Image: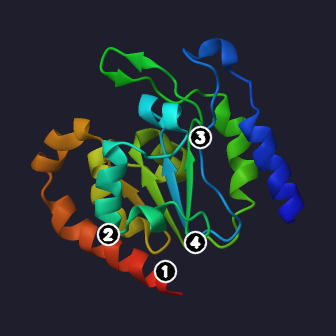
Amino acid sequence: MRQAFDQLVKEIRACQLCRHELPLEPNPVFQANPQAKVLIAAQAPGIRVHETSIPFNDPSGDRLRDWLNVDRETFYNPEKFAIIPMGFCYPGTGKSGDLPPRPECAPAWRDQLLTTLPNIQLTLVIGQYAQQYHLGKERKKNLTETVRSWREFQPHLIPLPHPSPRNNIWLKKNPWFDKEIIPLLQDKIRRILEY
């Protein structure tokens, strides 16, 4: 099984599927290991992540690690955290931020990669594209309502807003997120990582 996992990772890292649609050379950025306990289902790498090839190596990652109450060493331990975005490569920038994840990526690689992670106990579903994929019809009319309905997805899934600084206004408008979800999230992460 480990040989099949290693081969799949090699194939994903060499992917050229949407090369002609990307603003830069393909650079699939993700973190996975069959031993991972927590899956971070994200959107797509930003430019800094593309340049460093390290997932969430930016201000969004700083905030996410704060939300989880984990340090960089723990966060980047693939036996603890799998970090698998909806699109593995930087999609480029539009008028109001980064473009959506490329649609080719998830059907080509995502299901295959997720089946190699049998030890996932909690999935953090970050942002609307990941929520659409992971929640399907259970997703609410918008991101706020989906995140507010977090109890419906327990115990194995927590929908989250994107930790980007672009969401500062959302976080200020929704103080319940810090009061209700962050303490629960930190407690769940601590419990999972202790075992």
The residue furthest bottom is: 195
> On the rendered structure, is 106 left or right of 98?
right
Question: Which residue does the numbered mark 1 point to in the structure image?
Answer: 192
Return the x and y of residue 170 as percentages of the image width and height.
18, 43
Looking at the rendered structure, the kind of residue marked 2 is: Asn
Between the C-alphas of marks 4 and 2, the distance is: 16 Å
Looking at the rendered structure, the kind of residue marked 4 is: Lys
Question: Which residue does the numbered mark 2 point to in the structure image?
Answer: 69
Please state which of residues 150 and 183 is positioned toward the viewer in this rendering.
183
Q: Earlier in the sequence, mark 4 or mark 3?
A: 3
Q: Residue at x 60, y 63 (%)?
A: 78
Return the x and y of residue 60 as percentages of the image width and height.
33, 45
Q: Residues within 10 Å of mark 4 (few under 14, many from 20)?
A: many
Q: Residue at x 30, y 62 (%)?
A: 67
Instruction: Please identify, in this view, whether the residue under mark 1 or under mark 3 is nearer the observer.
Output: 3
Q: Residues within 10 Å of mark 2 (few under 14, many from 20)?
A: some
Say the numbered circle drawn on residue 29.
3
Q: Residue at x 74, y 24 (%)?
A: 16
The answer to whether 112 is drawn above or below residue 155 in the figure is: above
Say the numbered circle drawn on residue 37.
4
Residue contact at pointers 1 and 4, CB within 8 angstroms: yes
Residue contact at pointers 1 and 2, CB within 8 angstroms: no
Q: Earlier in the sequence, mark 1 or mark 3?
A: 3
Q: Earlier in the sequence, mark 1 or mark 2?
A: 2
Between the C-alphas of marks 3 and 2, the distance is: 23 Å
Between the C-alphas of marks 1 and 4, the distance is: 7 Å
Instruction: Please identify, in this view, whether the residue under mark 4 or under mark 2 is nearer the observer.
Output: 2
Return the x and y of residue 27 as percentages of the image width and height.
63, 31
